[in-house]
Amino acid sequence: MSAGVEAADVLRLSKEFFDRTVAPNAAAWDHAQDMDEKIAGLLGAQGLLVPSLPEQAGGRGFDMDVLGRFNEQAGRACGSVRNLIGVQGMVAHALQRWAKPPLRDRWVPRLAAGEVYGSFALTEPHSGSDARAAATVAERRGGSVVLNGEKSWISFAARAGVFLVFARLEGHVAAILVERDTPGVHVTPQGDLLGLRASHLAAIRFDGCEVPAEHVVAQGPLAFDAVATAALDHGRFSTAWGSVGLAAACLDASLERAATRQQFGTPIGDHQLVARMITRMVCAVDSARMQCEAAARARDSSDRDAVRRTLIAKYVASENAFAVASDAVQMHGAYGCSAQSSVERHLRDAKIQCVIEGTSQIQETQIGQLTLTSWRAAQRRAEALAPSQNGR
Ligand SMILES: Cc1cc2nc3c(=O)[nH]c(=O)nc-3n(C[C@H](O)[C@H](O)[C@H](O)COP(=O)(O)OP(=O)(O)OC[C@H]3O[C@@H](n4cnc5c(N)ncnc54)[C@H](O)[C@@H]3O)c2cc1C
């Protein structure tokens, strides 16, 4: 679906949903560390839980521009709901693209409908940024695969019905789908996080957990890049736009505060140093949104630069969101430091955006390396096209 009339209608519908059903509950869910279980099903019933899937798979066929704006709406309302949309999309798209038809057809429609939560289980206690060093192992046994190992900090694992697990199989990291009720699966909730507190994080231990060999979604030397890297790319795009939404919500709250809070006989926005904070916030929100739009354009046109553009968008948007949320708390004073304000929650959630789907430091490394690689390739192309010096 392109950004035409139909897309505008769907985005109006989704905005209404986030404004009425999600935003007013976000603080309570954060406090209770427990999102209303019905949210996934309510989104799924409208094709909005994984809206970038084709309609026949339970989505809305959103193109990247519309998907981005949808994630911005979600991020504005509630970080954990935005995280749910991101993670569910990572798992559903990976299965849609790589799983064999029986496995794909069994799980993708249920994930899209929100009948079941999916988790993307990559991180382990001893491998986070260095995800390829995963120590969870899988061994073939007859027509089965047996998993042993542990994953940690996995979003929605405390609720998930299926886990897309990355484990070492025959020398390479493979992607394997594990159903929650498989014997040998042990889930331990991990609560009391700084932010995204309604994301039902958990550790998962696999103790001789045996799954049918058909549950191996991808294996071999290219499996990690094909499945994990592509899913993380999808997750980053969602996180980037969600961060824009979070920052925009902080800006809105701060504008209202600047106009209504009086100190020294005048609204605080009249003080130049407060106006400067507004300037910084507006510039940070707008520049992050521009990076996200550039990433959406690159992805929609299958540009070879799309991965790097998405990395830049996620890096800029998450770091900007943290800076904007910090200024928003500052502008709200003591009230902003309390859970009565929305900006306090946004600041905690913003820090998490700089850690998930690759930390800011990993992105700084990757963006630099990819930029240099494409510069070198462009140089080589230019040299190949230039008339030879000797031939003159
Ligand atoms: C709320 C939340 C939800 C999450 N959900 C999921 C999920 O659904 N699935 C999943 O698999 N994981 C999930 N994670 C885990 C997340 O992906 C990892 O936390 C992240 O990849 C970083 O790994 P780490 O925590 O082990 O940090 P580490 O890798 O130990 O990094 C620690 C610090 O060292 C820096 N660092 C590490 N290596 C380098 C380097 N080469 N150069 C420069 N700096 C470096 C990092 O940037 C960071 O500042 C979640 C985490 C959180 C907080």
Image (cartoon, rainbow, N blue to C red):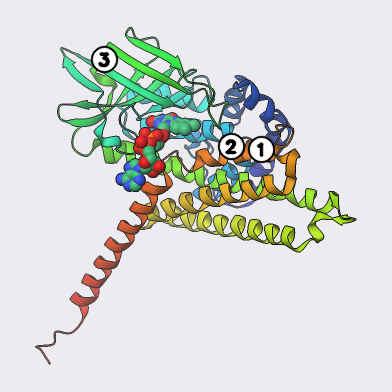
Give the SS element for disc 1: helix
Q: Mark 3–mark 1 contact, CB under 8 Å? A: no
Amino acid at the residue labelled 3: Pro
Amino acid at the residue labelled 1: Glu
Query: Residue 16 in the image: x percent, y percent?
Result: 71, 37
Query: Residue 1 in the image: x percent, y percent?
Result: 54, 46
348 or 101, which lies in front?
348
**Residue, x 34% and y 52% (percent of image)?**
366
Q: Mark 2–mark 1 contact, CB under 8 Å? A: yes
Residue labelled with disc 3: 212
Q: Is residue 289 left or right of residue 369?
A: right
- In the picture as drawn, the residue positioned furthest to the bottom comes out as 392
Residue labelled with disc 2: 348
Question: Between disc 3 and disc 1, whose residue precedes?
Answer: 3
Q: CA distance from mark 3 to mark 1?
A: 46 Å
Is residue 7 among the parts visible in the rendering? no
Q: CA distance from mark 2 to mark 1?
A: 7 Å
Can you tell which quarter of the image residue 221 is in?
top left
Query: 10 Å neighbourhood of mark 1: few (<14), some, or many (≥20)?
Result: many
- In the picture as drawn, the residue positioned furthest to the left comes out as 390
Query: Residue 197 in the image: x percent, y percent?
Result: 57, 27
Amino acid at the residue labelled 2: Arg
Residue labelled with disc 1: 344
Location of residue 181 with respect to 305 vertically, above or below: above
